[in-house]
Image: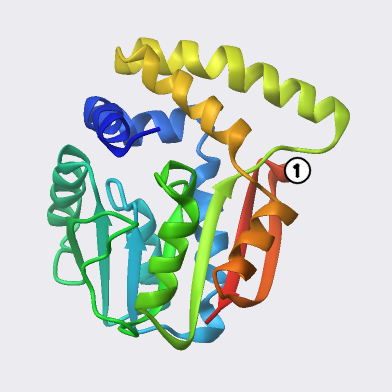
Amino acid sequence: MHKVEIRRIFDSIAYRYDLLNHLLSGGIDFYWRRAAIESLASRKPKLILDVATGTGDFAIAALRLNPAEVIGVDISIPMLECGKRKLAVRNLDSKIRLETGEAEHLQFPDNRFDAAIVAFGARNFENLEGGLTEMRRVVKPGGSILVLEFSRPRGFLFKQLYFFYFRNILPLIGGIVSKEKDAYRYLPDTVMKFPDGDDFVTILRKVGFNSITRRLLTFGVATIYCGEK
């Protein structure tokens, strides 16, 4: 999907985005972000870039690593505005800076960050390889990439239940709460099309990352991918 349409979708649901994330995942999204961030603990990154930051939840989770600064970028101004209000209320705006930016055209110099991270945003990149290549460019040699993304469960019974929920219940609830039915039809579509598992590991290798690991969460509903430049 073109970035203009992606921006329109996320602009339209910004004011209900956090509520729906927590509601539709049963609150388990907090655990997913925390588990992902903990995978970088041994690296002790001091400067972190959070791509497709949305309202900043992953950037906030990254503070568990005690970095000097986290910079979050996103194409949706309403999402960023929601995030900035959240940071101000929590007195976190001295640690996290949110600004507009596209994954495929990051406005930062080469080799600047210790880690580049993205949660539930890689599947929304207009050009997946282009976005990952840019993330690699701005990371220092020896630095890390961390991707937390939805994936498709493999166990037969759980997979059937999950797909029914994802294709029927989630769009219904999301559409009612956000009043934007298209946005929550878009979500299952992107998950079904995203190259998860071995296919995504292959792409990470193709764009130049090494030492790639992956960890399944909640029976494979989400996956943590880590790599090194």
Number of marks present in the image shown: 1
Is residue 149 depicted above or below 206 in this figure?
above
The residue nearer to you, when weighing 196 against 18, is 196
Q: Quadrant of residue 7?
A: top left
Residue, x 30% and y 83% (percent of image)? 112
Q: Is residue 199 above or below residue 173?
A: below
Q: Position of residue 32 (x, y in %)?
A: 55, 52
Residue drawn at x 74%, y 21% is 161
Q: From this viewpoint, which residue is outermost toward the bottom?
A: 141
Viewed as shown, does residue 23 lie left or right of 110? right
Is 149 placed left or right of 126 in the picture?
Answer: right
Q: Position of residue 115 (x, y in %)?
A: 42, 76
Mark 1 is on which residue type?
A: Phe
Q: Secondary structure at mark 1?
A: helix
Residue 87 placement, left or right of 127: left
Q: Quadrant of residue 204?
A: bottom right
- The quadrant where residue 202 appears: bottom right
Name the residue located 39 percent from the left edge and 56 percent from the top edge: 58
Residue for point 33% across, 56% down: 103
Above or below, 18 against 48 in this view is above
On the image, the x and y values in percent for residue 180 come to 32, 15
Query: What colour-coding does the image apply?
Result: rainbow
Residue bearing mark 1: 219
Q: Is residue 120 left or right of residue 161?
A: left
Front-lying residue, 227 or 153: 227
**Residue 3 % position (x, y):** 30, 38
Work out which quarter of the rendered image holds the N terminus and state it.
top left
